[in-house]
Image (cartoon, rainbow, N blue to C red):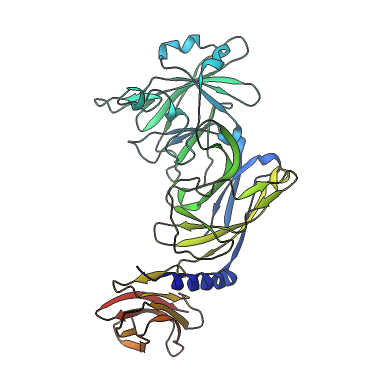
Amino acid sequence: MKRILPLLIVLGVLCSTLQAQTQVSGSVTLGAAYVNESYYKLSTSTEASLDASTWDIAFYRENNYDAAVRINDHKAISVFEASIAPSDWSTIDVANIDNWTQLYNSETEWTTGAFDNGSYSPANGYTFGYGWGEYNFTTHHITGKVIFVLEYADGTYRKFMIEDYYGGYTFKFATWDGTNWSADTTHTISNTTNTSNLFNYYNLETSSEVTVEPASTDWDLLFTKYNTDIMGDGSMMYPVIGVLHHPDIEVAKNDETTSTDTSNLTYNADINTIGYDWKNYTGSTYVVATGMAYYVKYADGTIYRLVFATYEGSLTGVITFNYSDVTNALDTETFDNDISFGIYPNPTINKQVSLVYDIPTGVNTENKVTIYSVNGAVVFEKTINDTAGFYNTDLDLSSLTNGMYLLKFQTGDTSITKKVVLK
């Protein structure tokens, strides 16, 4: 059994020190009654807030071989499957809405929208179904098979159908005036539009394409309203204000009410891992779960620790949070002989580095730390304790010039090398 817990507990303390030194205070404003949704980028502390009513439908555009279509939950538009026979288009009657199936966006992945959850799917015997259409292996088009009806919060109804997908989406829609359907509007959105974004967006009310999200590289978290499986068994979908994360990052939740131990972090790709339950309503005000920490991990290994601070509810829609880069504080290594070690802080601005390591009982081997310049010259060397126990050794590197070095930690016949930056 590897004895890494003492090391991780101390690194948790060091992590707290790091937060105190580099903690960033962030905030987003959704506005009174949550009229906005907000994208936030942690590394640049930037918010991009927009009117949530500007769009109705989002069309996934990153992959010409994958299609996904989402409804705007923030705008409270309900999606119903009215028919799987395209020939029924002219006879769709909103009086039948109680007999139709309501569909919802996935809350765990971006690439399954409400329309993709239509019944024209492999689960229902349509082998090449996409929920709303069928893939043709000869033409490589997806041909629309399902007619949907959208119900807006103000009582407006629109029928909608994706007719074709091939590097873009061709769809048609019409509006119910209480007696008849309007003339059909047909439009095509190409995947080559807005090439820096995950989705292209369309407003059915204004019959126009709209630009909504920032470039994919310019946001990490989306603060918005979405439907969640509130009971956890699929029996009730309920609108909540919460956070959905970018598809290229993963998040771990860690209850640090009584301990900052990070030894059991489990990162999750589900986009609602942060979700909505970082707050609770007491009947008169919201209480934020300040003891719950969220570790946001990027593909390059960067990790931010985020904790919510305040939530003002629908009066202002202001949400505040604190976060810090804890990448190096969580950077530990464990050797085959169960010795664990880490270095902190890295980069260091005062040329003082702490080497923390844990030697389990029964292990007796020489341990040494060596620092090399980028050209391979040894510039620092120290033999460290080899008896069982936990150690925190300070390395004074003030004699070295600013720059990047390589630190090698050697235990017996094995070693690990890490970059160390002195500023």
Q: Give residue 227's position: percent from left, percent from top.
A: 55, 36
Query: In the rendered image of this protein, does residue 248 appear above or below residue 83?
Result: below
How many numbered discs? 0
State left or right for residue 372 relative to residue 325: left
Residue 273 seen in render: yes
The residue at 40%/26% (across/down) is 131
Residue 115 occupies which quadrant of the picture?
A: top left
Where's residue 246, x and y in %? 47, 48
Q: Is residue 70 left or right of residue 145?
A: right
Residue displayed at 43% across by 50% down:
268
In the image, is 106 to the left or to the right of 97? left
Residue 372 in view of the camera: no
Vertical position of residue 310 compared to residue 334: above or below: above
Using the rendered view, name the quadrant where residue 169 is placed. Answer: top left
Q: Position of residue 191 (x, y in %)?
A: 40, 36
Q: Residue furthest front?
A: 362
Q: Nearer the viewer, residue 214 or 28?
A: 28
Front in this rendered view, residue 82 or 61: 82
Residue 205 lies in quadrant: top right
In the current view of this chain or complex, which residue is farthest to the right?
284
Give coordinates of residue 103: x percent, y percent. 49, 27
Viewer-closest of 85 and 232: 232
Which quadrant is the N terminus positioned in? bottom left
